[in-house]
Structure formats: C-alpha cells, structure tokens
Image (cartoon, rainbow, N blue to C red):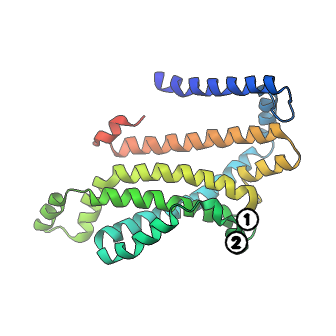
Amino acid sequence: MLSWLEPMSGLLVLAGGWQLASIIANNPTLVPPLQTIWAALVDLAHTDLTSDIIASLIHLAGGFGTGAALGLLLALFCARFQLVAVVIDPIAEFLRPISAIAWIPIAILLFGVGQGVPMFLIFYASLFPIFVNALDGIRRVDPTLIRAAEMLGASRRLVVTHIVLPAALPAVFAGARLSLGVGWVAMVAGELVGADTGLGYRIEYFQEFFSMEGVMATIVVVGIVGYVLDALLRLLQASLLRWSPVNGGSR
C-alpha cells in the first residue's frame, strides 16, 4: 500500500506547487490552474488522445526496439572480439555525449516530416545506455563459470544464452530503463518538430493556438505514459530477476 502512496504524495506536492504558481502568477492564460488543465485533459480524452498515444507508442517501439537490440548485439560482439571493441568503443564514446536533439535537422532532411524523425531520435538515444551497461555487465561475468561450462562441452552459443546473458541481465535491465527514459524524451522532441502524429505533435499543435491548458494537459499525459512504461519494465525485471540481489532493491 505504501509503495503506491509514495509516488502519489510526490504528485500531490507537484500539483499543489503548480496551483500555487498559478495563483501567484495570476495569469490563467500563461499558467492555467489545475481545473482548467483537467477540463482540457477531459476534452483531449474525447478527441485525439488515444490516437496520439498509439502513434507515440509505435514510434517508441520502433526506435527503442532497434536501438536496444543493436546495443545488446554490439555489446556481445565487443565482449567476444577485442578487435571489434577497439573499433566500436571510441565511436560510441564520441557519439554518446551528443544529444539526440542535435540530430533533429539532419533527421528532418533525411526522413522528412513523419514517423522517421522520432524513430531515428529514439533509436539514437536508446542505443548507447544499453550498449554501455550491457557491455559492462558481460565483462563482469565470472570467467570461472564460462570455463566450467566449456570444460563440460558447452558450445559458444550455449555459453552465451545460458551463462553470459543471464548473469548480465541486471546490467542489461539497468541500461534498458535508462534507454527507455531518454528514448521517451527524444520521442517528444522529435514529434514536436518532425512528426504529424503523437503526443509531441499535439503539444506543438496546442502551442500554435496558444492553448497553454492543452499543452499542459498533454504534458501530463506524457508523464503518465512514461511512468507506466517504466513501471511495466520494472515488473518485467522483477519477474525475470527474482534470483538477483539487485531485484531486492527494485520497487
């Protein structure tokens, strides 16, 4: 019960702070009160909310799925082949500090306005956190376990699927949660300027009509959906990592 009350208390503090700011600003156009935002949220729920959420989830699935898969694959190859690590590591360290938002102009030129821009930005943002964490987790696998499996006749594929990946799963999930978070941020940024559907596009749509209550209502939805996605990933982590001490600290 307390695990549900804790996040609710934080949200109540945030809502109270916004309502106080609205009263102090005394400008409902720029800082709309909670009741105005709620009314806009109800209106949005009866119009485009479902289609916008579905569009954003499609963008996230395409970008995050490919980014996470490639990041994990590159981590496996870098851990297995030193030559690959020598080539990939400097490239990753060069590209990793560059924000996905910096690639928006190039993404628009490459893909035009549509699904391509947010998917590309999500892919780029998601790739590096899971690559770095997975590679670190794989390199920390006890080599004694690997040698024991090889002495018992296990093939390389069996060692990877039954020893390396299970042992590295805590680090992989840590990277996946980071990737999901930054991917969700990149998705909103990409949809703001380079998409014709999605929650980010809806924020830009309301901004063009100077509807701050619509902007804030959509931002609330972005936060709720992002929280739910992270909660689902944590549930999957808890289900798959019951044996791990790390799971004892997840909530």
Q: Tell me where residue 226 sits by quadrant.
A: top right
Q: Tell me where residue 83 sits by quadrant.
A: bottom left
Question: Which residue is located at x 71 percent, y 41 percent?
Answer: 219
In the figure, 151 relative to 183: above or below?
A: below
For label 2, the SS is helix
For label 1, the SS is loop
In this rendering, position of residue 85 left or right of residue 213:
left
In the figure, 89 relative to 36: above or below?
A: below
Instruction: Residue 244 in the image: state x and y as whole percent.
Output: 29, 43
Instruction: Residue 63 in the image: state x and y as whole percent.
Output: 57, 61
Question: Which residue is located at x 85 percent, y 30 percent?
Answer: 28
**Mark 1 and mark 2 residues within 8 Å of each other at the beta carbon:** yes
Q: Nearer the viewer, residue 212 or 227?
A: 212
Q: Amino acid at mark 2?
A: Phe
Q: Nearer the viewer, residue 125 or 115?
A: 125
Q: Nearer the viewer, residue 93 or 108?
A: 93
In this rendering, position of residue 86 left or right of residue 163:
right
In the figure, 4 relative to 209: above or below?
A: above
Which residue is the site of mark 2? 111
Give the CA distance from mark 1 to mark 2.
Answer: 7 Å
In the figure, 240 relative to 197: above or below?
A: above
Instruction: Residue 130 in the image: state x and y as whole percent.
Output: 44, 57
In this rendering, position of residue 251 left or right of residue 13:
left
Instruction: Residue 9 in the image: state x and y as whole percent.
Output: 57, 23
Residue 195 seen in this snapshot: no
In this rendering, position of residue 121 left or right of residue 2:
right
Most distant residue in the left direction: 151
Q: Residues within 10 Å of mark 1 (few under 14, many from 20)?
A: some
Question: Which residue is located at x 78 percent, y 32 percent?
Answer: 37
Residue 170 seen in this snapshot: yes
Which residue is the site of mark 1? 114
